[in-house]
Each structure stands twice: as structure tokens, then as C-alpha cells.
Amino acid sequence: MTQIDLEGRAALVTGASRGIGRSIALGIAQAGGAVAVHYQSKEEAAARVVAEIEAAGGDAFSHAANVQISSEVKGLVDACVTRWGGLDIIICNAGIWKGSMVEEMTENQWDEMIDVNLKGMYLVTHYAVPHLKSSTAGTIVNIASTAGQRGEAGHAHYAASKGGMLAWTKSLAPELAPFGVRVNCVAPGWVHTDMAAAVLKADGKTINAGIPLGRAGKPEEIAAVACFMASDLASYMTGEIVNVNGGSVLCG
């Protein structure tokens, strides 16, 4: 069977210093792609990802940027183009997950969630699209969440931001298709990451009971789907939302 091959492709992965983003960056590199490892504050963690890729013979560099700030995102994309002469793949993964009941939710909490999860995706895409159009294999993969489809009590602002990512994917796919740029989305359920570790430790038994496969996912399981979407194996696929959640959306 044909393997995922990203040889000669240049990719930007946001939020790549840990968790799902880290696994995607490593997966792209293992498939032969060059990777920009974006981070906001975890410089040492990002450096470790780059070192791991380089130790295996891959091409990678790290770059800090606050995805809420337009000039910093432009600088991030420009750094990729300066290094590689273009950009073929963007993986919009950077995000935050914080809880708040609506009557306690502050305007600042709402703004931060929307700015990081939704505006950040917009800014990366905005600055990257001209380069993706120039590529022969321009691809966008957004990392959303099943919360964007099902909702999530106590995390309404998070669910709203992820629901926006789904609508963005569906809207952008036909807009960019005439230019040969594909846009798809992965919607993970519970995944073993630093961000979810405390909740999974405290409520893992209850959470697992609501997942037909009986467990939370691994970052590399999400990465495998994202890398497939970014590759030519998915060349006839655009505008799709793929749930990777152990079947949890089947339960409500």
C-alpha cells in the first residue's frame, strides 16, 4: 500500500511544541516534509521537537509567535517562506481549552478563547494562502474538536470557537478549490495531552464510559489522520470534517 509521502513539502504546524501539534510535526518530518515548529512561550519544548526531527535527518526550525497578533503571524509565515522559498502545508492546531460557566465567564475569557482558537487560525490562513496558491500541493488542515459539533457544557466559548473552525473549513474549501488548495479538518475527542491530563486523571473512568472504544486517544492517532489529509493520498478530499474520537459522537 502507498505510504504517506511529503518529500519536498514545506509545512507550518502551529502549537507544535507539545501534544497533538508535536505529534503532527514529527509525523510530517517522518514522511519527508520540512517543518516549522511554531510555539508561543514553550521555547525549550519546541527546541526539543526540532532536535528530534534533525536527529532523524529531517529539516525543521522553531519560531515564536502570538497567534492573536497579526504582525507576529505574518513574521511566522514570512520565516517559512524565507527558509524554503514557499509553503505547501499549514496545520492550524494552536489552541486553548479553559472552562467557565456562562454567568461567570468574563469578556476577557471569551475574547481570549475566540482570539487564540479562531482568530489565530484566520491570521495564519490569511498570510499563508498566497503561498499555498503558488504551491502545486497547497493544503490546509484545521484541528478542531467534537465539542464544535456536540457542544460542551461549562466550555461554551471553547465549543463556539471550534464550531467556527468547522464552518470556516466548509466555507474555505470551495473558495480555494479553484486554486488547487484543499481544506480539511480533524475533530478529535478526548486525547491524552498536557491540556487534558488533569481532567482525564480525575474523571477518566466516566469519560471512557462514554467512548465506545473505551479510552481516550493518543496524539499520534490524531497526527496520522492530519498527515494523511496533508498528503496526496487525500488529493480528492476537501471540505471534510473527520471525527477521531473513539466513536464518542455516536453517543449523542
Image (spheres, helix red, strand yellow):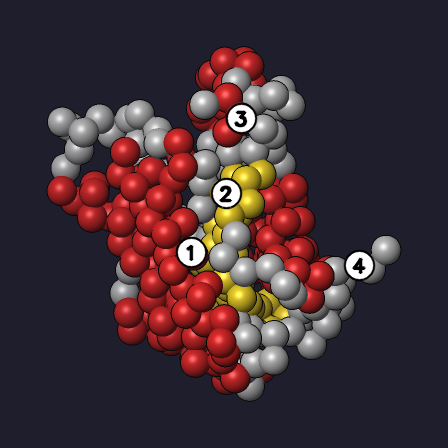
Estimate the x, y position of residue 35 in percent, counting from the top left: 59, 67
Q: Confirm whether residue 54 shows in the render.
A: no
- Is 57 drawn above or below residue 131 in the view shown? above
**Residue pointed to by mark 4:** 3
Between disc 4 and disc 1, the foreground one is: 1
Q: CB of mark 1 within 8 Å of CB of mark 3?
A: no
Instruction: Tell me the SS state at disc 1.
Output: helix
Q: Residues within 10 Å of mark 4 (few under 14, many from 20)?
A: few
**Residue pointed to by mark 3:** 250
The answer for how far apart the CA atoms under marks 4 and 1 are is 27 Å
Left or right: where does residue 190 sit relative to residue 50? left
Estimate the x, y position of residue 118 in percent, counting from the top left: 32, 54
Q: Residues within 10 Å of mark 3 (few under 14, many from 20)?
A: few
**Residue pointed to by mark 1:** 170
Observer-nearest of 46 and 84: 84
Q: Of the residues under marks 2 and 3, which one precedes in the sequence? A: 2
